[in-house]
Image: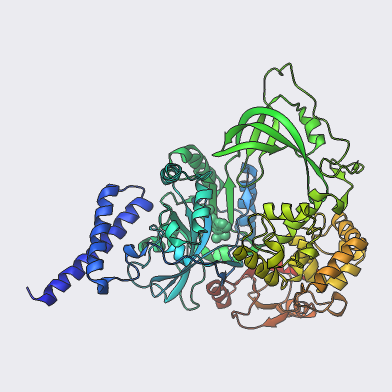
Amino acid sequence: MTAGGRATDTARRAAELRERIAYHDHRYYVLDDPEISDAEYDELLAELQRIEAEHPELVVPESPTQRVGGAPAASFAPVRHRLPMLSLNNGFAEEDLRAFDRRARERLGREAAAITYMAEPKLDGLAISLFYRDGRLAQAATRGDGETGEDVTGNVRTVRAIPLSLKGAGWPDAFEVRGEVFMRRADFERLNEGLHEAGQRGFMNPRNAAAGSLRQLDPAVTAGRPLSFFAYGPGWVPEDFSLPTRQSAVLDWFADMGIPVCPERSCVRGTEGALAYYREMAERRGELPYDIDGVVFKVDDRADQQRMGFVARAPRWAIAYKFPAEERTTRLLSVDFQVGRTGALTPVARLEPVLVGGVMVSNATLHNMDEVARKDIRIGDRVVVRRAGDVIPEVVGRAGGEREPDTREIVLPDACPECASAIEQEEGKAAVRCTGGLVCPAQRREALRHFVSRKALDIEGFGDKLIEQLVRAGAVSNPAELFSLDAQRLQDFERVGPKSAQNLEEALAQARETTLARFVYALGIREVGEVTARALAGHFGTLEALMQASVEELEAIRDVGPVVARHVSNFFAEPHNREVIDALRRAGVHWPETRPAAERPQPLAGRTYVLTGSLEGMPREEASARLQALGAKVTGSVSGNTTAVIAGENPGSKLAKAEKLGIPVLDAAALEELLHSP
Ligand code: D41
């Protein structure tokens, strides 16, 4: 045989090995039905490695040998998602599912007919976006806040369950797949065993293991972590590419390309079909090779999905029906009172450690003293502890049976346990508060933790331990003072080396550029969460306008009730708060300004709508005029700049275009809402 012929044979063998390895990855990670042992798999991989070592020209980027992990990164680069990664609305009871189905039928005008849903287990992992270009994995990003995630391509390339190149042909030049990265229970247990043997701490549960492994800065570490992946839906696809018309068919198409999808997926009809699926999964939950925390139902027809659109970051056409939270019984050893950001004292139960839903629980909230009284809980009692997903474990109540003889009453302290200030109880309110305000180190600490948190100013590196030290040392007593810290000063603190001090200084520098919504949220005004903060920022446009707003003006904003309006107004009336805000601005914290509301009575400014089909109860011309009066632009053709398409009866091609571009579609009812929102 000629030298050329041998080279060809070797190339052929390498290709065959790559194919066989991909096949076995699929059997293992998708079908949960391996045909060969780990040792046999390792032999295939070793042979391929040998060939590639001798013939480096045969190495291709999508070879399984290339899943070893590249160079460690200093940080993850932000990735802006081409289409936002939405979240799922949750249901917890049969009634929630029935209501979901009823609304879906109403919205689709099909009260009588059963809707087909695609059902699948809800994996307990983390959502990621995969971007394929020319059939090769080009980029992977975490979900992040849904708008912007982190580039974890290096890590994801090490995940054997995720194909580096797609099978078959006919895929678009570029497109995005979304799914969940998770860890199977057996893999998790094996990983923990290995970590323990190496004298390292294991992970609490498979979810933490998956999240911790994916967010490793060193891909070589991720390469040693047995992560799995199932795709749950499409992301961005090119304008001129037609996806299959059904959700279930999209997933079948993914499977054809070698992208793992959950084999438990199934189409069901109506509420009854959905409930039967839920019950079946609840029963089989323990047999599945991975943890699930519920099931997800999605309207299967994608045109129907488009018609239904979404509200506040979650599609109207999907629901996660969660399994009931896990509960265990244990003993209440003692109760401490924790002071929160707003001074509220929360009774925290110290418990005899107990495993609840895979997590060791030794602390749980008792919420407030009214709840303690209502549940008649005493120290020494046996209590029921519940943990659901990521929420803080809570004491649900006293366990059944006779009360032990030696229990003690839970008593509220007469002063703040952190600063000894007086405590007060607002009339008619359960919450008890420390009156120390920002004199109280606990409140300072919590205010700072909130200020630097991800949804606030997102200042990386300021962990609980560092904040605690900063407050104790008197280095920082309010958020503005954070900005007077430099690398030099930060090195004075424990566990802050020169490198991390430099990183902290850079994080502070970056955080100075923010948005008004984040800034308002970061202030930590009582009951102002990110959604309210966004509403306030959007409505007023400038901080000055917001600070001057009257309670009446605030109350008039949608989603702002009288209580929140008062908290906002009180917050800005407080001289100390105004001083901190001034100091923050002097420290260089800034955001893009928009014009104040008074000059901008146009709440829909900057939005572009396209009308199509005949709208119930309103001629299209009228709809157009009213939208424009509120500042919106109304155009005739759908493009990337279109905010939403408003579709009535017999919509036509504009609807299809919107669907391709992933542009939200509103119906007549949603238009009404839009016209009446402030
Ligand atoms: O299994 C899951 N965890 C899962 C998550 C799933 N099966 N389907 C999902 N579908 C969506 C929509 C409907 C928004 C496309 C999801 C998620 N979202 C999701 N996961 C994390 C945030 C959102």
The percent position of residue 511, horizontal first and vertical second, equals 70, 69
Location of the C terminus by quadrant is bottom right
Closer to us: 220 or 31: 220
Extreme-left residue of the structure: 1
- Whether residue 371 is visible, yes or no, is yes
The percent position of residue 113, horizontal first and vertical second, equals 56, 54
Location of the N terminus by quadrant is bottom left
Residue 173 higher or lower than 309, as above or below: below
The percent position of residue 429, horizontal first and vertical second, equals 87, 42
The percent position of residue 124, horizontal first and vertical second, equals 53, 49
Closer to us: 384 or 489: 489
Left or right of 575, for residue 237: left
Left or right of 132, for residue 39: left
* Residue drawn at (64%, 35%) of the image: 362
Closer to us: 452 or 639: 452
Closer to us: 423 or 246: 423
Left or right of 446, for residue 124: left
Q: Quadrant of ligand 1?
A: bottom right
Left or right of 292, for residue 392: right
- Whether residue 677 is visible, yes or no, is no
* Residue drawn at (25%, 67%) of the image: 53
